[in-house]
Amino acid sequence: VQLQASGGGLVQAGGSLRLSCAASVRTFSRYRVAWFRQAAGKEREFVAGIERNGGSTFYPDSVKGRFTISRDNAKSTVFLQMNSLKPEDTAVYYCAASSTVISSAISYPSAYGYWGQGTQVTVSS
């Protein structure tokens, strides 16, 4: 499975961005997908996760109410809508997919075998 993340860029605080993660697999609905981010000098951090059918989503408190993850299995694509962006959201954002990760482990980077290349998001104050 190859993942291609896109949509990053430079935005002012309070602005919005929409990230996309396109997968090169027809059976995309078999995979749970998550977004992570990694700021310079920091560990990779869970940002959002979504169940195979999109029925359930997961967020840490740091982004809840501002970020929304969604998916279009017909297009093998997952989206991350980011609103009310803050300077502390600045990071490289990665999408990850796994056909075996369980819901309780969806926030753990080690649970994912497939990763996109990352897209830079920079929020200026």
Image (cartoon, rainbow, N blue to C red):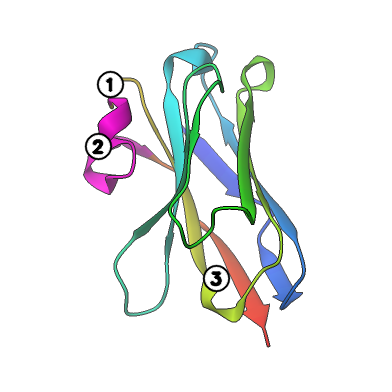
- Looking at numbered disc 2 in the image, what kind of residue is underneath it? Ala
CB atoms of marks 1 and 2 within 8 Å: yes
In reply to whether residue 111 is colored magenta, the answer given is yes
- Looking at numbered disc 3 in the image, what kind of residue is underneath it? Asp
Label 1 belongs to which residue? 100
Camera-nearest label, 3 or 2: 3
Q: In x, y percent, where is residue 9?
A: 69, 67
Label 2 belongs to which residue? 111
Neighbour tally class for label 3: few under 14, some 14-19, many 20 plus, Cα within 10 Å: many
In reply to whether residue 22 is colored magenta, the answer given is no
- The stretch in magenta equals 102-114
The disc at residue 89 is: 3
Dot 3 falls on a residue whose secondary structure is helix
Q: In x, y percent, where is residue 111?
A: 24, 37
Dot 1 falls on a residue whose secondary structure is loop
- Looking at numbered disc 1 in the image, what kind of residue is underneath it? Thr
Q: Is residue 76 above or below residue 48?
A: above
Q: Earlier in the sequence, mark 1 or mark 2?
A: 1
| Circle count | 3
Which residue: 71% across, 78% down?
13
Which residue: 32% across, 74% down?
42
The one nearer the camera, 55 or 35, is 55
Which residue: 43% across, 14% down?
30
